[in-house]
Image (spheres, helix red, strand yellow):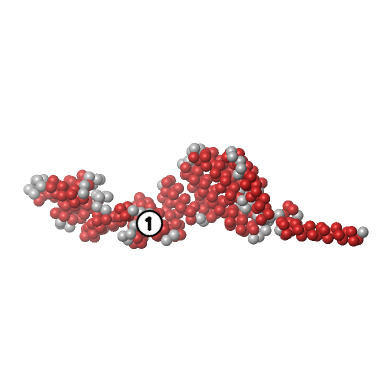
Amino acid sequence: MFGYNQRIISKLLKLTVAIAALFGTNAMAGADKISPVSDYQYRKDYAQYEEIQKEADLNKRAVLILDFVKQHPISRTLQANAAAYLACVKPHLDKKDYAKAIEMEEAFINLMPTEQKVKDEEVPEPGAGEFVKDVLKPTQKLMWSELINAYYLSNNLPKAAEIGEKAYAASQDNAMASTLAQIYLKMQNWDKYLAYGDKLLAAYPIDQSYAIALQMAQVYFQKQDTAKGLELMAKVIDKFGDTPPQGMKADAWNVQRAAYNGLKGADAYKQKDYAKAIEFYQKAVSLSPKSDDAPYYYIGMSKWNSQDPEGAIEAFAKCVALKKNLAQKAQGYMEQLWKARHNDSLDGLDAVVAKAKADLGV
C-alpha cells in the first residue's frame, strides 16, 4: 500500500511541475492565478482577438470587442483591440455622426483598466509594469486622443478641452499639450493657449517649434503685448535668417520677416526715432514689396517728420499705388505736400504715382 501511495504522490508532483512549466510559477497557487499578462494568456487572448476580426459586420464586431475587454481588461491584446474597435467607429465619423462615435469610444474607455486595477489584481512583476508602460498607457493615449477628436469635430470644444486636460495631467504628453493648444486657440482662450504653447517651446528647440512660436507671437500682438510678440518672432528669425524653415516657402518666410521689421519700425515710430523707423520699414519693403502698404505710409510719415518732403511724396505714392488700407490717407498727405511745392497745383503728380506703380509692378 505504501509503495502504491508513493507512486501516486510522484505522479502528482510531476504533474504539478508540468503545470508550473507551462503556465508559470503563479499556477502553483491554483489555476485561477494564471497571470493575465503571461505568454500563455496572451496566446489565448490573441486567438480570441483573431476570431473576433472574422466578424464582417462592424457593429457586431464592436460588440464582441467590448465583451472581450469587459471579460479581459488586463490583456496584452488591449491596444490591438482598441485599434480594431476604432475601425468600427470610423464609419460613424465619416458620416459625421459624432454622437454615436463619442458614445462608442466612451463605452470602450469605461471598460479599460486603470493602473490601480492592475495593482489590485496583483499582477506579478515585471509583467505588471511592462503592461502599464507598453500596453495600457499607449492605449489610453490612443483612445483619449480619438475621443477628443470626436468632440472637437462636433464643435464641443469645452468637452474636448476637459478631456484633454485630464489626459495631459495623467501623461504630461507633449502631443496632448499640442492638441490642447490647438483647442484653446480655436476657443480663443488666449491665456490657456499661451500656457500650453510655452510648454511646447520648452520641450522642443526653436527649429522644431517655430510654427507655434509664430502663432503665439500673433496672439501676443492681439493682446497688445508687442514686446513679447517681437521677442518670439526674433527667436525664429535669428534662428533661420535668410533661409526659410523646412516646409515654408521663401515668399511666405519673407512676409514673416517683413512683418517683423514692420513691427520694429512701428515701435521706433512711436518713440519718434524716425531714422530707425525708416531703416526697419525699408527692410520690410525690401523683403516683401507688395504684401502691405503700412511700411510705405510710415516711411512717408517718418520722412515728412524728418524734413524730407520729396522722400515722403515718393513713399506715399507707393502706398497709393498698392490701393490697400492706407491708400486714401496717403493720397491726402501726398497731395498736401505736392501742392505746397507746386503752387497749389496737382499737375505732374499722376506721373509720380505712375512711376510708383511701375517700380512696384502693379
What secondary structure is marked by label 1? Answer: loop
- Residue at 90% in and 61% down: 3
- Camera-nearest residue between 3 and 342: 3
Quadrant for the N terminus in the image? bottom right
Q: Is residue 332 left or right of residue 252?
A: left
**Residue 114 in the image, given as x and y percentages of width and height:** 61, 52
- The image shows residue 49, relative to residue 232, as above or below, that is above
> In the rendering, at what x and y percent does residue 265 appear?
26, 56
- Residue 276 position, x and y percent, is 24, 60
Residue under the image location 75 percent in, 57 percent down: 19
Amino acid at the residue labelled 1: Gln
Q: Say left or right for 208 vs 316.
A: right
Image side of residue 49 versus residue 179, left or right: right
Kindly identify the residue that appears in the image at 66 percent across and 56 percent down. 39
From this view, report whether residue 361 is shown above or below residue 206: above
Camera-side residue: 54 or 223? Answer: 54
Residue 95 horizontal/vertical position (percent): 49, 37
Q: Residue at x 64, y 51 (%)?
A: 75
Considering depth in this image, is 147 or 327 the residue closer to the camera? 147
According to the picture, the residue beneath numbered tag 1 turns out to be 246
- Name the one closer to the observer, 353 or 232: 353
From this viewpoint, which residue is outermost toward the right? 1
Q: Crowding near pointer 1: few (<14 within 10 Å), some, many (20+)?
A: few
